[in-house]
Image: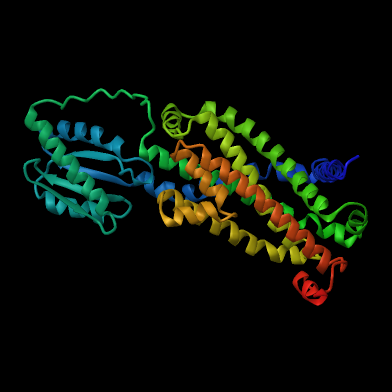
Amino acid sequence: MSPLRRQIRQTLTIARRDFTATVFTPIFLIFLFAPAIMGSLSVLGGVSAASVTQGSSDKARLVAMLPAASAKALRSADAQLRPLVRGDAAPPPLALHPSVENAQIVSRAMLDAPGADVNAVLYGTLAEPRVVFSAGNRDDARYLATVSRQAALIERAGADAPTARMEPVRTAAPKRGDRNAASFLAVFGIFFLTLFLSGQVVGTMAEERNNKVIEILAASVPLESVFLGKLLGMYGVALLFVAFWGTVLSQVGALLPGDFGADLAHLRPAIGMVPFALLFAAYFTTAFLLLGSVFLGVGAQAGTMREVQMLSLPITIIQVAMFGLASSAVSHPGTLLATAAEFFPLSSPFAMAGRAASGAQWWPHLAALAWQLLWVAVFITIGARLFRRGVLQSGSAKPAWRRIFARG
């Protein structure tokens, strides 16, 4: 058996060993369902926070005191404008009251009445509307003013204004805004996956250092094969995680509302959906291997789990910094910042994934993948040498350049 074939076989053996040791444990189920657990806690917190303010927001209302002839136009204007404001910014319900004498005094009394929860009051006529509002409800007052203007236009026309028929059209080429949104989603997707998955690589050697297993492996297998094998084993775990949740989300996607699904359909990458999916998978692979190789080399220097935990913060800072750099790069394509993000090894997968969504050229991606894999080999080699020299104490006591000059 040739040395290269033997080394490949040893690497795959280490990878299979770490993969089975990680997957076939009860702890892996907790790790696999961690997104569901975190999502459930987030939803529970959101529901709890919403329930605190729901009572007061449900009671809040806007009041309009207008003549009966103008009330119909005002209600029609409110029905036209209210769908344009959604979510938390949506105005309170509008209540119509008959016009009364001394409307200014009555409107102020409505605002001051305890338990009434009236945010703003419109009175007068549509030709000369007046709006009073309590402190902190200026947006609701502006909404009432806009509704009164629209109602005046409707009343002047003598009938409700015609409503345009809206028809969505699927364009052939993605728009610039859609490409930018797809680029950011690509960067965020790789960042989220690597942040959640690559951190587990840090502690893969701490336990084996404590029980002396790593010394047995280093005596029979080259350390470079041990590092690469462990990295590939953790990558297999990451693929299993992504495949599981990808299948779940693909089924949940069928339950999304029609408008939301149509909005996602517009986020088409410029290079094409199938090529983009392949490039996204390739860049996720290189991002995981790059960050994993760095974290494996750094984590191999930690002897206890406490030291591993101390390394978690700088690891997270590095990942967030790479995400910020890549996000800025996709927002300013073609600039020096974008070139630096695409060239720097740790941010290159993020930035190039965003570039795949905004550009249709293939050759930069082939060059970037080769560049990133080269740095994976460099990081693994450096990590293995540092581990051999600093932990196993089996390296030379002098650096290579000193040994060369000593021989001369």
> Which residue appears at 43% of the width and 46% of the height?
54
Is residue 42 among what the camera can see?
A: yes
Q: Quadrant of residue 301?
A: bottom right
Between 202 and 111, the one nearer to me in the picture: 202
> Which residue appears at 47% of the width and 47% of the height?
50
Q: Quadrant of the C terminus?
A: bottom right
Between 395 and 88, the one nearer to me in the picture: 395
Is residue 41 among what the camera can see?
A: no
> Which residue appears at 15% of the width and 37% of the height?
150
Between 161 and 15, the one nearer to me in the picture: 15
Q: Would residue 11 appear left or right of 66 to someone viewing this image?
A: right
The percent coordinates of residue 23 (x first, y second) are 79, 41
Please, which residue is most extreme toward the front here?
408
Q: Quadrant of the N terminus?
A: top right
> Which residue appears at 75% of the width and 57% of the height?
381
The percent coordinates of residue 138 (x first, y second) are 25, 54
